[in-house]
Amino acid sequence: PALVHLHKHEDGFVRTHSALALARMPASPPAEVQTVVDGLKSTDPGLRSFAAAVLSEMGPQAGDALSTLAESLNDRDGYVRLHAAEVLIRYDRWSYQALDALLGGLKDKDENIRWLATYSLAELAPESQETVDALLKATHDPVIKVKVGAVYALGEIGPFAKSACTELRKLADTATSQELQSAILYALQQIEQ
């Protein structure tokens, strides 16, 4: 009951948190989905990003909100685009657009968006040559955490990323970072298994 009253709180983060809590309860009221949709339409990019993440937690309860979330694939904020893509890639209707947004994240000017995009791709491990090619390009990023993330993601894709092995071996010959060398070893083991 107290959570229901928080749907009317003046702070959008409080409203969205209460929607998440209600969504985790059995037989929760449908109003929480609308609260999260309202969060997606906020002028605050942090709230839009959080609302997208909450929709991923809601799963099938998100229902009609997914159409609104799909609009977030074109949000001007990279974090919002990433969160929306992470949710929508699981649905056939939006999977191509979502993958495109994740691959676009690998080229974002913000190094943290590029790094997070590598880890999203690692978690999702889409078997597409377009993904392998984009991750291979990201192994040449000037930021080490992005390189490591891209290599790790190639490993998570596994045998489908076999075309990356030659490039990974070349990268291993020049890698000075222990973290990058470890990621390359892991990736090659996963790909060549």
Image (cartoon, rainbow, N blue to C red):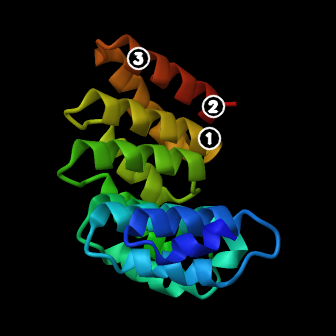
Say if mark 1 contacts mark 2, CB within 8 Å: yes
| Type of the residue with mark 3 | Glu
Say what secondary structure mark 2 lies in: helix
x then y, percent, for residue 128: 53, 59
Task: Give the alpha-carbon distance from disc 1 to disc 2, as whole Å.
Answer: 5 Å
Check whether the beta carbons of the residues at disc 3 and disc 1 lie within 8 A of each other. no
Q: Earlier in the sequence, mark 2 or mark 3?
A: 3
Number of residues whose C-alpha sits closer than 10 Å to that of mark 1, classed few (under 14), some (14–19) or many (20 or more): many
Separation (CA) of disc 2 from disc 3: 17 Å
Question: Percent position (x, y) of residue 127?
Answer: 58, 56
| Residue tagged 1 | 158
Q: Is residue 96 visible?
A: yes
Residue at x-position 39% and y-position 69%: 12
Q: For the residue marked with disc 2, what is the amino acid?
A: Gln
Callout 1: helix, strand or loop? Answer: helix
Q: Is residue 104 above or below residue 171?
A: below
Callout 2–callout 3 Cβ contact below 8 Å: no
Q: Is residue 25 left or right of residue 134?
A: right
Residue that appears at 82% across and 69% down: 26
- Quarter of the N terminus within the rendering: bottom right
**Which residue corresponds to mark 3?**
179
Instruction: Name the residue carrying label 2.
Output: 190
Q: Position of residue 133 (x, y in %)?
A: 39, 51
**121 with respect to 189 (left or right):** left
Other-residue count near label 3 (Cα within 10 Å), few / some / many at <14 / 14–19 / ≥20: few
Side of 82 relative to 44 (left or right): right
Mark 1 and mark 2 lie on one chain; the one further toward the N terminus is 1
Q: Tell which circle, 3 or 1, labels the residue nearer the N-terminal end.
A: 1
Callout 3: SS? helix
Q: Nearer the viewer, mark 2 or mark 3?
A: 3
Depth order, front residue of 21/171: 21
Q: Classify 10 Å Cα crowding around label 2: few (below 14), some (14-19), many (20 and above).
A: some
